[in-house]
Image (cartoon, rainbow, N blue to C red):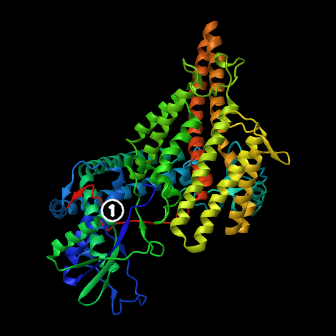
């Protein structure tokens, strides 16, 4: 906790004939994070080259492409599939030989036929689009083509056109433009073209059809309907294939992917004609285990050694080391940045404080229950690990929301039967205070400020720990004292304020005796702390002095915990007043036919209003809670930029080795 999992650097050396069992065992153990070998004249690796793939890589890649092509047809994603039964590798090999070629052939034939039908449908739809302008022209389209002594114009004009030469014209009026069909003698073609151009004429091609436009459109519509029935039949067949073989397809993909990763592993090793060398990282508590496993599968024909680790200079991969309840918050950490190997991992703190901030903001039993129900419902929809972790984070936030709703005595903006246990957030909306008490806004603001003071102080303390771990010599002392200086400046400012003003829920130092120059003991102590802190900060970096005003802004930023929460309460109470006080209540007092309409309107306002407020509450509660961590908290101690620990292997879901 509060630190990544300790890692050991492991060296593996063996003859090339042992590559297959070693690679297979490493993959099975899923512990060894491979350090890719790069040919750059590395000391101790003279004469070594990057290895070549093991036998079977090309065949597995070809089969994987085929399987993924079938999965794409069915829109199958492994992470969205629940693993019902695992297939053993012998079972998969047997079914790959017996079933997969037939599935591939049948799916290929069906998708090819569907593609041809779809092309035909689009062709007919294009013909219908070409016929559309002529739907109200009662003439066989064949009669509009093939003239030698007449010219035919068809198209759209934006305003009326007057033709003075002998002609036949049909006009179909439209909202913004009209469709015209004009037949004129060939000798008058140029004059008519000029008149039409003056009317902003846009020509339309006369379809190569025989019969009237409505008749041909009806014909093509029938053809499209018939083709779509055929496509529906094909889709039903594909759906049956998908239902019958989804488990096999995802298992085949997993098996082929595992084979490819194993056969391509030597591309990451250093090799000669006789031996190969692999370097990588293993969790420190599993080093002996992996050495024993390799020794067993090779009959002792492998050399495994633990290399010295320099945490400050080696790029050590980072694996989280958190209790189970904190693991979902690792997703929020990865969004920001994974911690470096040598720094404090704040995931545990984030997993505790984030739900508290969220609940403090939203703080409503009704909204919390709705959010909790939504989390459980979405678990049926989202199957991926990241989505599941996010839903667990939201679930914890919803539980916190319910707890704070009980403390605030809030349920969808209404007051619960008991008085608020901590502070009231009920506003004077609707003309009267709720149950004779008003909101304790001042007290809530002070609580938010206290939260900010303690949260930022903790961040600076963690900053001192990080610098003590990561820095050396005089710079370490300066960096640690600089972080301590930020703490003393902040607390000096706070003590100075306490010494000058009496505030609720904060120590009152205004009564301390005057020591010198009209300054009380509290002010003197505050000045000493501020001056000492500024000196410590300046010793590390003089430029940091210009950042001193951010102390106040960062502390005051925690007031958003109250401000955003009060806005949610206000919206909820306004929705209740509008739906019940303005529509439902008056309608029930003087019930009539119109009252039914008013009640329906009131219910709609109630449901839509609270749905919108819940959405805003989730968005605001989540964004502001995580912002206080990312901006106000992490910037005091956290750098991030750690390299993710990616062990060679996979957690099999559909196959078993």
218 sits to left or right of 488: left
Pick the residue in front: 430 or 276.
276
- Label 1's element? helix
Pick the residue in front: 1 or 19.
1
Query: Is the C terminus in the top left, top right, bottom left or bottom right quadrant?
Result: bottom left
Q: Mark 1 — residue?
A: 68
Q: Where residue 51 sits in the image (x, y, percent)?
A: 31, 83
Residue furthest to the right in view is 517
| Residue 134 visible in the picture | no
| Residue 565 visible in the picture | yes
Total label count?
Answer: 1
**Is 166 drawn above or below residue 57 in the view shown?**
above
Pointer 1 local density, CA inside 10 Å: few below 14, some 14–19, many at least 20? some
**Is 26 drawn above or below residue 212 in the view shown?**
below
160 sits to left or right of 74: right
Q: Where residue 496 sits in the image (x, y, percent)?
A: 75, 46
**Is 231 drawn above or below residue 543 in the view shown?**
above
Pick the residue in front: 61 or 388.
388
Q: Quadrant of residue 185?
A: bottom right
284 sits to left or right of 568: left
Residue at 70% across, 42% down: 175
Residue at 37% across, 54% down: 75
**Is 77 drawn above or below residue 605 in the view shown?**
below
Q: Where residue 583 sits in the image (x, y, percent)?
A: 64, 17
Pick the residue in front: 207 or 528.
528
Query: Is the N terminus in the top left, top right, bottom left or bottom right quadrant?
Result: bottom left
Q: Where residue 257 sits in the image (x, y, percent)?
A: 30, 66
């Amino acid at each position: 906790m509060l630190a990544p999992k300790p890692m050991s650097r492991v060296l593996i050396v063996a003859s090339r004939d042992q590559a297959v069992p070693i690679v297979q065992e490493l993959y099975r153990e899923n512990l060894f994070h491979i350090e890719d070998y790069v040919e750059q004249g590395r000391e101790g690796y003279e004469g070594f080259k990057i290895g070549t793939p093991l036998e079977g890589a090309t065949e597995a890649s070809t089969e994987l492409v085929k399987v993924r092509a079938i999965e794409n047809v069915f829109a199958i994603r492994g992470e969205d599939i629940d693993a019902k039964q695992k297939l053993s590798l012998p079972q998969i090999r047997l079914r790959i030989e017996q079933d997969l070629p037939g599935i591939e052939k049948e799916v290929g034939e069906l998708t090819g036929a569907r593609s041809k039908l779809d092309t035909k449908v689009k062709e007919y739809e294009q013909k219908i689009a070409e016929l559309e302008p002529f739907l109200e022209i009662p003439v066989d389209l064949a009669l509009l083509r093939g003239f030698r002594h007449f010219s035919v114009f068809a198209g759209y004009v934006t305003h009326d056109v007057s033709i003075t030469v002998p002609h036949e014209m049909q006009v179909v009026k439209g909202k913004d433009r009209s469709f015209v069909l004009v037949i004129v003698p060939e000798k008058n073609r140029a004059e008519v073209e000029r008149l039409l151009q003056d009317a902003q004429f846009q020509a339309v091609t006369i379809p190569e059809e025989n019969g009237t436009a409505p008749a041909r459109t009806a014909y093509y519509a029938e053809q499209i309907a018939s083709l779509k029935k055929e496509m529906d039949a094909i889709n039903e067949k594909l759906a049956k294939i998908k239902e019958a073989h989804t488990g096999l397809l995802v298992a085949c993909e997993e098996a082929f992917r595992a084979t490819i990763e194993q056969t391509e592993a030597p591309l990451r090793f250093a090799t000669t004609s006789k031996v190969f060398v692999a370097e990588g990282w293993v969790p420190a508590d599993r080093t002996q285990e992996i050495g024993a496993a390799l020794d067993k599968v090779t009959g002792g024909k492998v050399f495994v050694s633990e290399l010295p680790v320099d945490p400050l200079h080696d790029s050590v991969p980072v694996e989280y080391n958190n209790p189970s309840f904190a693991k979902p918050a690792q997703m929020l950490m990865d969004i920001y940045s994974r911690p470096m190997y040598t720094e404090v991992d704040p995931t545990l703190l984030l997993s505790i404080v984030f739900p508290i901030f969220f609940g403090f903001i939203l703080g409503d039993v009704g909204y919390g229950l709705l959010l909790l129900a939504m989390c459980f419902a979405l678990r049926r929809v989202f199957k991926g690990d990241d989505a599941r972790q996010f839903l667990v984070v939201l679930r914890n936030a919803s539980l916190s929301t319910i707890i704070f709703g009980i403390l605030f005595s809030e349920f969808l903006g209404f007051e619960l039967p008991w008085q608020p246990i901590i502070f009231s957030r009920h506003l004077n909306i609707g003309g009267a205070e709720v149950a004779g008490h008003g909101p304790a806004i001042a007290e809530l603001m002070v609580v938010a400020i206290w939260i900010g003071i303690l949260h930022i102080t903790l961040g600076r303390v963690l900053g001192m720990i990080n610098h003590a771990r990561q820095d050396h010599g005089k710079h370490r002392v300066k960096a640690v004292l600089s972080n301590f200086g930020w703490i003393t400046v902040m607390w000096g400012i706070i003590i100075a304020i306490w010494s000058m003003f009496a505030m609720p829920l904060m120590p009152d130092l205004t009564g301390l005796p005057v020591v010198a120059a009209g300054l009380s003991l509290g002010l003197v102590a505050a000045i000493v702390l501020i001056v000492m802190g500024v000196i410590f900060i300046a010793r590390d970096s003089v430029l940091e002095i210009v950042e001193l005003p951010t102390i106040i802004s960062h502390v005051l930023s925690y007031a958003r915990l109250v401000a955003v929460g009060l806005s949610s309460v206000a919206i909820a109470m306004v929705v209740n007043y509008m739906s019940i006080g303005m529509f439902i209540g008056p309608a029930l007092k003087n019930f009539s036919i119109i009252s039914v309409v008013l009640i329906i309107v009131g219910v709609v306002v109630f449901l839509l209003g609270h749905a919108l407020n819940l959405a805003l509450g989730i968005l605001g509660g989540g964004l502001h809670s995580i912002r206080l961590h990312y901006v106000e908290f992490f910037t005091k101690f956290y750098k991030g930029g750690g390299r993710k620990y990616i062990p060679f292997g996979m957690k099999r879901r559909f196959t078993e080795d």
